[in-house]
Image (cartoon, helix red, strand yellow):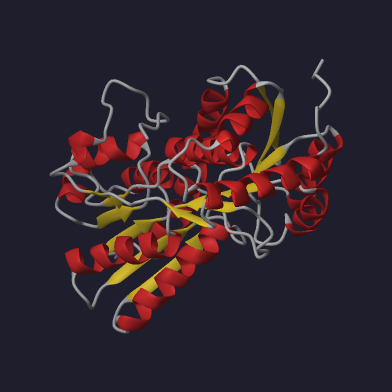
Amino acid sequence: MKASKEVSRRQFVERAAGAGIAMTFGACSPEADPTESREKAEFEDRRWTIGFSNASETNTWRTALREAIEEEVDKHDNIDLLVTDANDSPAKQVADLEDLLTKGVDGLIIGAANLYVANPILDECEREGIPVVIVDRKVSSEKYETFVSTDHMYGAVKGLSKLIELIGPERKIAILEGLPGAGPAVERNAGYDDVLAKHPNIDAVRQAGDWSRASGQRVMENIITAHPDLDGIHFDSGEMAVGGIQALRAAGISDDMLKANQPCLTWLDGYNGGLKLIKAGLGKYTILHPPRLHGSLSVDSMIKIFKGETVPKQQPIALDEITQENVDQFVAMDKPDDYWTM
């Protein structure tokens, strides 16, 4: 059974704010700041509970995110973790979040199902003094402490621009988009819109999936049947790309044809199965979107908040570009496709 809290949530926030002020003035003194040791003692001398509301585990990126959060929490003997899976249902996520608050969490990490689902909970957390870390998927409210994510629009622009660079400006392409309404898909689609607006002679076919291998295969089957003359294909995730290549092979497109850019393939993220395809020459480019780094940074940020430390409102994660030339730095050939190295 979870130990009773030593201070209320509101008292905790007030003390943390006060500690931040004391540290600001204390920086002018050469003497050691007693506030720092007091904060450390308070954090280490009580139990904390973090709630993680995951939008879903329908794709392996979000599974790896949850695993990373669990691994980071396990490093601390005085932190309990409660995890929920909304299965991509906004209604379920609202219920999940309400349940986590009922269970008395000290802080929430939220990977939101869409831009708006968390807003009522964020209002309640603000009233109750419960800190919130938003991870990966943007929300429309600003009532959170920090947002940990890569720049989805930037990644989409880089990925699609690379495809057009590789095939030329007057070609026919397909874009397999992510889950409609989810924050990353909204941001990435805006990036795709911007790129296509700059290349009016590109004929683009666009359909949405849900970032899973199954959706990549299903959507690619539909597209290649109707448009067998594609010059290039961009996938919104590496897992979708693996499924998409299965569909292309079934449609008679050989690996040798893919190596020769017939059609040329690019995608987003560092899904290990996709990295293996880049190493084999079937895919030409991806840009990293690391779930494990998202998870560890989210927990680390929450602990800093518990200790009364300041965290930035935005915490963008750097994006590494991956091609056949540098893929060996990222791929794990001895691991399964669903493994995420970062």
* Badge count: 0
Quarter holding the C terminus is top left
In the rendered view, would you say 27 is above or below 70?
below
In which quarter of the view is residue 110 placed? top right
Q: Residue at x 24, y 57 (%)?
A: 263
Pick the front one: 116 or 51: 51
Please tell me in which quadrant of the rendered image residue 2 appears: top right
Q: Is residue 3 left or right of residue 283?
A: right
Q: Position of residue 309 (x, y in %)?
A: 56, 44
Closer to the camera in the image, 45 or 263? 45
Residue 118 lies, in percent from the top left, at 73, 54
Q: Nearer the viewer, residue 3 or 229?
A: 3
Residue 328, image x and y in percent?
Answer: 19, 34
Q: Quadrant of the N terminus?
A: top right
Q: For the point 77% across and 48% down, which residue is it? A: 129
Question: Residue 341, relative to residue 124: is it above or below?
Answer: above
Q: State the residue at coordinates (68%, 64%).
A: 141
Residue 83 in view of the camera: no
215 shown above or below 7: below
Q: Nearer the viewer, residue 283 or 318?
A: 318
Q: Residue furthest right?
A: 102
Q: Position of residue 120 (x, y in %)?
A: 80, 57
In this view of the protein, can residue 181 be seen by the observer?
yes
At x 72%, y 43%, the residue is 15
